[in-house]
Image (cartoon, grey):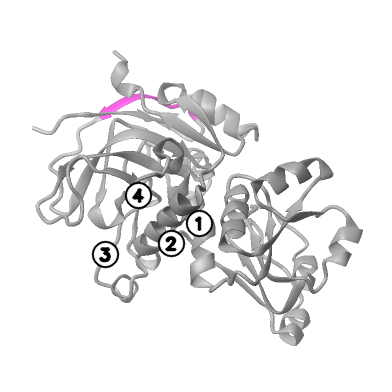
């Protein structure tokens, strides 16, 4: 008999999470069961909780930045052993047979399974996933802070690998929040010349501490005009509608504006600046298991960790309120205390 899993679930859009139990059934032959130690809260959890994307099923158990220990293995799993400390992010499975999977781009699989879409996530005592997406943590990586690397971290690290960003490049980051603060840390360690676009001068010192060499105030027309023809690469981490032509103008010839932020409106920009400067606009999702593993080892080598705030998992609704209010600096991690309850 399978042991029931204790979890926290919402039973409707924008509803508070409450105690919930479910029985997961037999473990799949390629599945891993993880005893959850901690789990980050991502803004995607909030979007799914509120059904902003129209694909949430209830009861809904959020959580896709999981750190924990392997406690059970299906008979056809590989690489992992009972007791391994591991991480699990947005993806929990992929088909393994399509062109994307076979070429090592499992994150682009059209049949990829998301950890919190149509299944229960990591705000629970245990969670399951296919072994290919369960990643051993390197020795020396701070497990208490590592959860957000599995989603926000790989989201901003993936473009560095996929787009061949060079240490000699001049780069800029738009939005110094949950994603952007990690992008600054990665890009500084990558060896780039790093600029942070901020919305106020008061954020300058914080951006510099996070890894920027300098800042530009994105609400200051003089700063923006002076940035023309400055950057090989600009990474947008915001979900806001911005004046994209201004940022295209800030690119050098052959420069790229790349978005990992889910901008809600079409990104309007003139064609001629793109054509004449041979500039480009692109986007990307999270990375493959191989790139995520590379990111974890890079983080360990350079001592990179998200800046986090800690809540007990039982206080998840307080943590969501903190996130909704825009007060998170910069990521929230929930420490699992569900086994301690009645």
Question: Going 62% across and 67% down the picture, which residue do you hit?
Answer: 258
Q: Tell me, yes or no, whether the two marked residues, 3 and 4, touch with CB atoms within 8 Å.
A: no
Closer to us: mark 1 or mark 4? 4
Which residue is under mark 2? 287
Look at the image and give the residue range highlighted in magenta: 15-21
Q: Are marks 1 and 3 in contact (CB under 8 Å)?
A: no
Which numbered tag is attached to residue 155?
1
Pointers 1 and 2 in contact (C-beta within 8 Å) = yes
| Residue 243, percent from left and from top | 78, 62
Residue holding disc 3: 95
In front here: 297 or 293? 297
Which is nearer the N-term, disc 3 or disc 4? 3
Which mark is nearer the camera, 2 or 4?
Answer: 4
Residue 19 belongs to magenta span: yes
Question: How far apart in space, not on screen, are marks 2 and 4 (Cα)?
Answer: 18 Å
Mark 4 sits on what residue? 138
Q: Could you tell which of marks 2 and 4 lies nearer the N-terminus?
A: 4
Task: Give the left or right position of residue 297, taking residue 47 as reference.
Answer: left
Tell me the crowding category of disc 3: few under 14, some 14 to 19, or many 20 or more residues within 10 angstroms, Cα based: some
Residue 265 falls in image quadrant? bottom right
Q: Earlier in the sequence, mark 1 or mark 3?
A: 3
- Residue 40: image quadrant is top left
- The residue lying furthest to the bottom in this view is 276
| Alpha carbon distance from label 1 to label 4 | 19 Å
């Amino acid at each position: 008999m399978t042991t029931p899993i204790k979890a926290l679930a919402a039973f409707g859009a924008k509803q508070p999470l409450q105690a919930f139990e479910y029985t997961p059934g037999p473990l799949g032959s390629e599945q891993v069961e993880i005893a959850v130690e901690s789990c980050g809260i991502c803004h995607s959890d909030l979007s799914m909780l509120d059904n902003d994307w129209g694909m949430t099923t209830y009861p809904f158990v959020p959580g896709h930045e999981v750190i924990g220990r392997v406690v059970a293995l299906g008979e056809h799993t590989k690489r992992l052993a009972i007791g391994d400390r591991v991480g699990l992010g947005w993806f929990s499975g992929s088909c393994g047979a399509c062109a994307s999977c076979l070429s090592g781009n499992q994150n682009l699989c059209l049949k990829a399974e998301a950890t919190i879409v149509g299944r229960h996530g990591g705000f629970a005592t245990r969670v399951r996933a296919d072994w290919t997406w369960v990643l051993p943590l390197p020795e020396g990586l701070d497990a208490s802070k590592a959860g957000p690397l599995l989603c926000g971290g790989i989201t901003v690290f993936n473009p560095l690998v996929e787009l061949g960003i060079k240490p000699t490049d001049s780069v800029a980051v738009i939005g110094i929040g949950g994603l952007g603060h990690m992008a600054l840390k990665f890009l500084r360690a990558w060896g780039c010349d790093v600029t942070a676009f901020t919305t106020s001068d008061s954020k300058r010192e914080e951006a510099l501490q996070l890894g920027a060499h300098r800042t530009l105030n994105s609400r200051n027309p003089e700063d923006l005009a002076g940035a023309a023809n400055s950057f090989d690469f600009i990474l947008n981490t915001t979900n806001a509608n911005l004046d994209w032509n201004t940022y295209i103008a800030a690119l050098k010839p052959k420069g790229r504006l790349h978005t990992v932020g889910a901008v809600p409106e079409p990104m309007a920009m003139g064609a001629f600046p793109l054509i004449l400067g041979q500039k480009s606009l692109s986007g990307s999702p999270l990375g493959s298991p191989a790139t995520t593993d590379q990111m974890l080892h890079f983080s360990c080598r350079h001592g990179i960790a998200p800046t986090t705030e800690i809540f007990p998992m039982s206080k998840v609704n307080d943590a969501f309120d903190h996130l909704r209010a825009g007060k998170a600096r910069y990521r929230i991690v929930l420490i699992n205390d569900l086994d301690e309850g009645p």
